[in-house]
Amino acid sequence: MLVVEPAAAQSARDDTSKLVSIQGIRSATVAPSGLAYGAVALTNRQQDGDEFVDGPEGSLSFGFGVGDASRTVGLQFSVNLTSLSDGVGESGSLSIKASRRLGGLRVPTYVGLSVDRLAGWGEAEDFDPSTSLAVTMFPRIEVGDESYPLMLTAGVGSDIVDDQSDPGVFLGAGVGLTHNLGASVAWTGETVSLGTVFRVDGLDSMRFGASVDDVFDQEDRRRLVLTATFFVDDLFGR
């Protein structure tokens, strides 16, 4: 199974700033209210029991955001189709994430609670729900005349290590390099992921991502993951 959080949902309405995201871990942010997305992820290796084997696998995710994290609570609801090799829609689950921006801080800071693997079916039916709590900050650094946005995330989860069966800690940092490109590094709890997110001029409603999971092959799980996310703004009108 393959589940990947859509890239750069938090920047989907910002077409001017440098692009920033973190690949490979959950963040504390949610899709803005009224924004819906569809995402596809493809990889060259898939999990078979306790091992990773060569062979393509993919997943689909669809979701939308409601509420305002800056004023009350932002919510994101997602449907995750966790395997394409066994037939589209034959395995999947639901996810809910709540996010709140902390007031009184100069640096935008969010706290997010995610509940994943809800109401699973197919292969995902055998997994219990998992939870994670994360904090995400968006500071900036100045280098000469240039300003670069950062995205920093730290969190804990119930199913992070030992084949996603035991609690663990995850960390990540991303930097917006240009209007079209961002890069990130993440500690997933057991391995390191290196990633990039990018957008193409003229395709304002799309984001693309690429990452190498387990980049140092610590758990013999190194694989390439490619993602594409399509956004639909103002789902509920204005």
Image (spheres, rainbow, N blue to C red):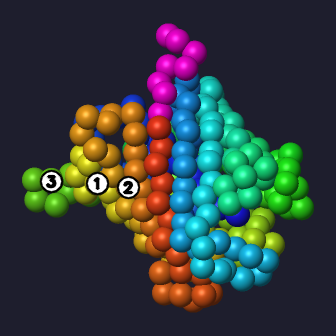
Label 3 SS: strand
Numbered badge on residue 100: none
- In this rendered view, identify the residue nearer to me: 182 or 124: 124
Image position, residue 66 (x, y; %):
62, 27
Q: What secondary structure prevails in the magenta region?
A: loop
Q: Is residue 235 magenta?
A: yes
- Residue 97 in the magenta stretch? The answer is no
The structure residue drawn at horizontal position 76% and vertical position 67%, both measured from the top left corner, is 159
* Label 1 – label 2 distance at C-alpha: 6 Å
Q: Which amino acid type corresponds to the residue marked 1 in the rendered image? A: Leu
Q: Disc 3 designates what residue? A: 146
Lower sequence index among marks 1 and 2: 1
Q: Which residues are magenta?
A: 231-238
**Which residue corresponds to mark 2?**
197
What secondary structure is marked by label 1? Answer: strand
Judge from the rendering whether residue 182 lies leftward or rightward of residue 36; answer left or right: left
Q: Which mark is residue 181?
A: 1
Q: Eyeballing the image, is 1 above or below 80?
A: below
Tell me the distance, in whole angstroms, between the alpha carbons under discs 3 and 2: 20 Å
**Disc 3/disc 1 C-alpha distance (Å):** 15 Å
On screen, residue 186 above or below 136? below
Q: Nearer the viewer, residue 132 or 88?
A: 88
Report if the CB atoms under discs 1 and 2 are less than 8 Å apart. yes
Spot the residue most to the top. 238
Residue 49's quadrant in the figure?
Answer: bottom right
CB atoms of marks 3 and 1 within 8 Å:
no
Query: Can residue 3 be seen at all in this image of the molecule?
Result: no
Residue 68 locus on image (x, y percent):
57, 27
Q: What amino acid does circle 3 point to?
A: Glu
Callout 3: few (<14), some (14-19), or many (20+) C-alpha neighbours within 10 Å? few
